[in-house]
C-alpha cells in the first residue's frame, strides 16, 4: 500500500478500511517510492508506541543514513535539533524550552489577535459574495497570528510564509532545499532582531531560556513551531468548515444550541485531522507488537486518522468525546494544542458570525484533496454567500452554515 498516491488522497478512509481488513492494526506501506514503513492503524497499539519512547524513539539518524539524498519525504522526516526529531535527554531539553515559552502566551490576548486578524480578512472579501476560504482566510490568518506570537517583523513573516509555500509545493530535493534556505534566512533575521531588542514573544523567551539554545537550535525550534503552527491549523479551520457545510447536524443543531463550534472541531479531529499520518518513530531493535515483527530502524508511522476510527476502540456518538489522537500522545504530544484550539475556534466564530449564510460554491464531491500521505488538506474551499458590508466592531449575528 502506498501513502503518496492520488487514490489514497481521494479516499483515505476507504484505504484504512481495506488495510484493517487485510492486515489488522499494523500495515506495511511505502511512504515514498522504495521507502518502506509500518503504518499503525490500531488505537491501542498507537497508545503503546507513543507512550514508549525508549523502544520507539523519534531520532531518525540511523534510518536517514540509508535513504537516498533525493528521497521526497526526507525533508519532512530527517533529523533536526528540535523537539520533534530527537529522543532522550536531547528531546527533553528542547521540549522544556518550547513548553516553557509557549506557556507564557496570554490566551486572552491571543483571542484578541485572532479576532482582529479575522475581521480584517473578512472585510477584504465580504462584499464580493464569494471567496476561497483556504487562501483568503485560513492560511493568511494562521500565518499572521504565528508571526505575532513569534515576534516576526513584517519582512521576516513574509519570507517565512514564502518559504513555507515553496516547501509545500516542492516536488524534488532541489526545491525543498531552496525552501529550507529561505526558511532559515527568515528565522535568523528574527533571532538577530530579538537578540538586539527582546520583547514579549516566543522568540525572545526561547533566547532567554535556561536551556541556552545555540543559533542552529534556535532556528530549528522556531521553524518547527512555525511549520506545525500554520499549515495544520489552517487545515483544521478549513476541514471544520467543510464538515459544517455538509453535515446537517451543524446546520440545525448548531442553531438550536445542541452542538457548538467546539463540537464540530472535535468531530474533525476524530475523522479528518489535518495531520492524518505522523508521529514517526524508529525502533532501535526489532520489536514484536501483536503478531508482527517491526524491523529495526524502519519508520513506524501513527495513522492518527485511522486510529481515531478504530472500531475496536471508538463506537457510537462522539459528541463531547476528546479521546482522539489528533494531538498525539506521550512525551511528544503537541505542546500547543490549547493555543491551536483558541486560534481555530475564534477564527470559525468570527467568520460564521460575520457571514452566517456561507454555502459551498461547488458540490462537496468536486473538492480536491492535496496528494500526500501525511496530511489531510484541501486544495481550495470555494464558498458563496450574500454580499455583506464590513460589520461594525463587536457586531454579532446568529451562526449557521449549510450546503449549496
Image (spheres, helix red, strand yellow):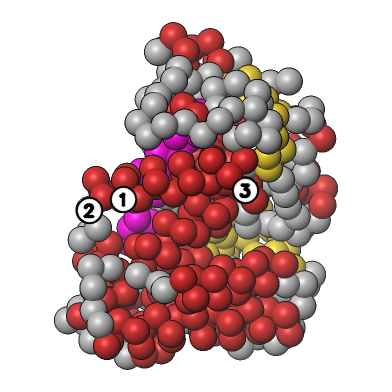
Secondary structure, mark 2, is loop
First of labels 1, 3 by sequence position: 1
Counting from the top left corner in percent of width and height, residue 198 is at 23, 79
Vertical side of 188 occupied by 145: above or below: above
Secondary structure, mark 3, is helix
Residue at 32 percent across and 90 percent down: it is 214
First of labels 3, 2 by sequence position: 2
Say few, some or many: other residues with alpha carbon within 10 Å of mark 2 (under 14 / 14 to 19 / 20 or more): few
**Magenta residues, start to end:** 330-352
Secondary structure, mark 1, is helix
Say few, some or many: other residues with alpha carbon within 10 Å of mark 3 (under 14 / 14 to 19 / 20 or more): some
Please say if the residues under marks 2 and 1 sit with CB atoms less than 8 Å apart.
yes
Counting from the top left corner in percent of width and height, residue 109 is at 26, 50
Question: In the rendered image, which residue does mark 3 sit on?
Answer: 136
Mark pair 2, 1: CA separation? 6 Å
Relative to the observer, which residue lies in front, 379 or 83?
Answer: 379
Residue at 39 percent across and 46 percent down: it is 116
Question: In the rendered image, which residue does mark 2 sit on?
Answer: 106
Vertical side of 337 occupied by 80: above or below: below
Amino acid at each position: 500500500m502506498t501513502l503518496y498516491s492520488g487514490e489514497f488522497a481521494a479516499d483515505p478512509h476507504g484505504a484504512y478500511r481495506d488495510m484493517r481488513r487485510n492486515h489488522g492494526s499494523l500495515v506495511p506501506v511505502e511512504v515514498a517510492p522504495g521507502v518502506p514503513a509500518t503504518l499503525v492503524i490500531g488505537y491501542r497499539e498507537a497508545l503503546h508506541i507513543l507512550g514508549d519512547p525508549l523502544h520507539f524513539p523519534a531520532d531518525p539518524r540511523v534510518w536517514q543514513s540509508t535513504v537516498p539524498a533525493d528521497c521526497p519525504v526526507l525533508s519532512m522526516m530527517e533529523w533536526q535539533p528540535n523537539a520533534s526529531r530527537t529522543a532522550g535527554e536531547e528531546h527533553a531539553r528542547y521540549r522544556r524550552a518550547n513548553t516553557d515559552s509557549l506557556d507564557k502566551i496570554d490566551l486572552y490576548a491571543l483571542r484578541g489577535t485572532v479576532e482582529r486578524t479575522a475581521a480584517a480578512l473578512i472585510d477584504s472579501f465580504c462584499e464580493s459574495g464569494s471567496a476561497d476560504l483556504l487562501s483568503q482566510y485560513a492560511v493568511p490568518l494562521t500565518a499572521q497570528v504565528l508571526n505575532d506570537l513569534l515576534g516576526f517583523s513584517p519582512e521576516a513573516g513574509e519570507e517565512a510564509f514564502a518559504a513555507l509555500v515553496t516547501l509545500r509545493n516542492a516536488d524534488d530535493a532541489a526545491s525543498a532545499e531552496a525552501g529550507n534556505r529561505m526558511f532559515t534566512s527568515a528565522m535568523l533575521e528574527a533571532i538577530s532582531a530579538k537578540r538586539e531588542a527582546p520583547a514579549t514573544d516566543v522568540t525572545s523567551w526561547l533566547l532567554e531560556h535556561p536551556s541556552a539554545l545555540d543559533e542552529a537550535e534556535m532556528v530549528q525550534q522556531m521553524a518547527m513551531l512555525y511549520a506545525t503552527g500554520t499549515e495544520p491549523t489552517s487545515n483544521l479551520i478549513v476541514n471544520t468548515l467543510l464538515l459544517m457545510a455538509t453535515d446537517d447536524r451543524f446546520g440545525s443543531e448548531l442553531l438550536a444550541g445542541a452542538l457548538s463550534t467546539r463540537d464540530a472541531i472535535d468531530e474533525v479531529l476524530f475523522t479528518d485531522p489535518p495531520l492524518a499520518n505522523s508521529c514517526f518513530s524508529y525502533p532501535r531493535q526489532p520489536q514484536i507488537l501483536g503478531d508482527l515483527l517491526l524491523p529495526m530502524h524502519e519508520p513506524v508511522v501513527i495513522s492518527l486518522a485511522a486510529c481515531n476510527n478504530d472500531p475496536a476502540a471508538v463506537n457510537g456518538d462522539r459528541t463531547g468525546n476528546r479521546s482522539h489522537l489528533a494531538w498525539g500522545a506521550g512525551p511528544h504530544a503537541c505542546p500547543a494544542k490549547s493555543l491551536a484550539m483558541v486560534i481555530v475556534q475564534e477564527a470559525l466564530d468570527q467568520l460564521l458570525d460575520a457571514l452566517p449564510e456561507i454555502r459551498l460554491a461547488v458540490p462537496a464531491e468536486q473538492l480536491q484533496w492535496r496528494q500526500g500521505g501525511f496530511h489531510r488538506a484541501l486544495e481550495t474551499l470555494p464558498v458563496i454567500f450574500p454580499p455583506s458590508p464590513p460589520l461594525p466592531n463587536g457586531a454579532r449575528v446568529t451562526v449557521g452554515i449549510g450546503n449549496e
